[in-house]
């Protein structure tokens, strides 16, 4: 199957926002910069709030269809007896203004979502849509463990590609096992689209003291992902023009790693493991179900910032301001219902982590 010549893909899940609304003019600026440099791949999903609609306004209505490639995803966990897989697909087409998707994925296949796919006939629906030409290439995104990946591929040879979480920190992580998942994809002959190459921004904020001279943190992480065997597209959830320009620069020459780069990667891995950084990717899948409205990724980010750069006042004050304004719940208010843990693709022990974070953030007065 064909993939775009240039490997950088634009993930439309972290677009510029104000008051929770995606900003159209700013998004258009990013899209135009990306397209002007010859990049074509855009990735959205039914569950990325406002993202499919912005794709319509910023891309579909402004560029000829053969100038870009569009990917979206079906969320099996949102289906019900009154909202079918076909309803969801058609809604995605309507929101994006497209007549077909170049790449269409079943989103985040894990045990419960696979069961939903079976219950609501997702596989049959996507096969029919592919036969009708409304899906050009069929795949799935995956954050689970290698045995499950193997099982899905054994049962679904028709899948053409896989979207995997891959970055240098997750290669041997017991929660992600990206290296094993990549090996399985290769064994089954499936090309890979990489998501989370900078681990939700965590690897973009690596201290310059750990990087080779002249190399930026995102550049190192993106080149690492792009250089791996079988990787055809690397998605980056870009939020501002500076990121777009920097990523374009990274992907405008060969994505190779030097010995110095590899030494830096080893040092960064050591730093993160020994520094007990919380491996949250800020995907926010955990937040909508929280009965106490705790902004879990924000809490984790605040504590990571404290641990990584030793910055005391700002992240903690920012968190406490939001709590005091009643906009988010306090970490200490967690009732351990564990709804968030069931939704977390990183399998983080969120309730235990929140307890740790609460001791750091909630106690004492603001700085
Ligand atoms: S376990 Fe705590 S943080 Fe998680 S959903 Fe329940 S109340 Fe919210
Ligand atoms: S805790 Fe898990 S689900 Fe929540 S934002 Fe972080 S990685 Fe995503």
Image: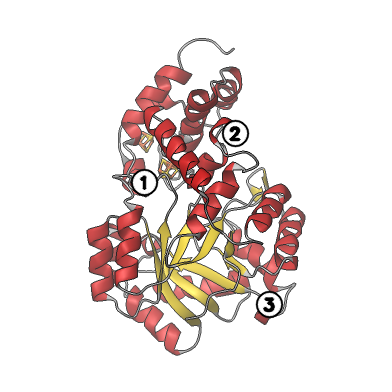
Q: CA distance from mark 3 to mark 1?
A: 35 Å
Question: Along the horizontal axis of the image, is 359 left or right of 70?
Answer: left
Give residue 77's position: percent from left, percent from top: 37, 60
Label 1 vs 2, first from the N-terminus: 2
**16 up-or-down from 335: above or below:** below
Please tell me whether residue 221 is drawn above or below residue 55 in the rendered image: above
Task: List the residue tagged with mark 3.
Answer: 67
Is residue 301 placed above or below 90 in the rendered structure? above
The C terminus, quarter of image:
top right
Q: Quadrant of residue 178?
A: bottom left
Q: CA distance from mark 1 to mark 2?
A: 26 Å
Q: Is mark 1 within 8 Å of ligand 2?
A: yes
Eye-nearest disc, 2 or 3 = 2
Instruction: Write the residue at 54% across / 57% down.
Output: 256
**Closest to the observer, 282 or 260:** 260
Q: How much space separates mark 2 and mark 3, taking CA atoms? A: 37 Å
CB at mark 2 closer than 8 A to ligand 2? no
- Dot 2, how many residues are within 10 Å of its Cα: few (below 14), some (14-19), or many (20+)? few
Q: How many marks?
A: 3
Q: Position of residue 124 (x, y in %)?
A: 33, 81
Q: Is residue 56 left or right of residue 300?
A: right
Ligand 1 positioned in quadrant: top left
| Mark 1 secondary-structure assignment | loop
The residue carrying mark 2 is: 208
- The residue depicted at 34 percent of the width and 40 percent of the height is 348
- Give the labeled residue for mark 1: 346
CB-based contact (under 8 Å), mark 1 and mark 2: no
Is 317 on the left-hand or right-hand side of 355?
right
Q: Secondary structure at mark 2?
A: helix
């Amino acid at each position: 199957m064909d993939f775009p010549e240039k490997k950088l893909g634009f993930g439309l899940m972290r677009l510029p926002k104000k008051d929770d609304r995606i900003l159209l003019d700013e998004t258009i600026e990013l899209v135009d910069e990306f397209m002007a440099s010859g990049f074509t791949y855009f990735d959205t999903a039914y569950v990325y709030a406002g993202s499919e609609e912005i794709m319509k306004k910023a891309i579909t209505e402004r560029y000829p269809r053969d100038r870009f490639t569009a990917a979206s995803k079906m969320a099996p966990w949102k289906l019900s007896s009154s909202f079918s897989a076909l309803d969801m697909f058609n809604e995605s087409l309507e929101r994006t203004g497209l007549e077909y998707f170049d790449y269409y994925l079943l989103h985040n296949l894990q045990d419960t979502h696979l069961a939903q796919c079976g219950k609501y006939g997702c596989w049959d629906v996507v096969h029919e849509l592919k036969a009708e030409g409304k899906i050009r290439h069929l795949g799935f995104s995956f954050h689970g463990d290698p045995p499950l990946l193997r099982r899905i591929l054994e049962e679904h040879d028709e899948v053409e590609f896989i979207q995997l979480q891959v970055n240098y920190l997750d290669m041997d992580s017991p929660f992600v096992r990206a290296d094993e998942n990549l090996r399985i994809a290769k064994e089954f002959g499936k090309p890979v689209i990489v998501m989370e190459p900078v681990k939700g921004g965590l690897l973009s904020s690596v201290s310059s003291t750990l990087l080779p001279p002249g190399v930026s943190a995102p550049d190192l992480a993106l080149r690492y992902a792009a250089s791996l065997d079988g990787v055809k597209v690397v998605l980056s959830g870009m939020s501002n023009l500076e990121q777009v320009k920097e990523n374009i620069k990274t992907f405008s020459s060969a994505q190779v790693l030097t010995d110095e780069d590899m030494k830096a990667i080893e040092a960064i891995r050591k730093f993160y493991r020994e520094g007990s950084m919380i491996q949250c990717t800020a995907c926010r899948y955990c937040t909508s179900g929280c009965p106490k409205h705790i902004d879990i990724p924000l809490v984790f980010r605040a504590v990571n910032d404290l641990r990584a750069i030793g910055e005391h006042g700002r992240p903690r004050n920012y968190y406490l301001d939001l709590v005091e304004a009643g906009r988010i719940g306090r970490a200490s208010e967690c009732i351990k219902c564990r709804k968030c843990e069931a939704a977390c693709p990183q399998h983080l022990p969120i309730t235990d982590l929140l307890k740790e974070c609460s001791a750091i953030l909630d106690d004492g007065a603001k700085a």
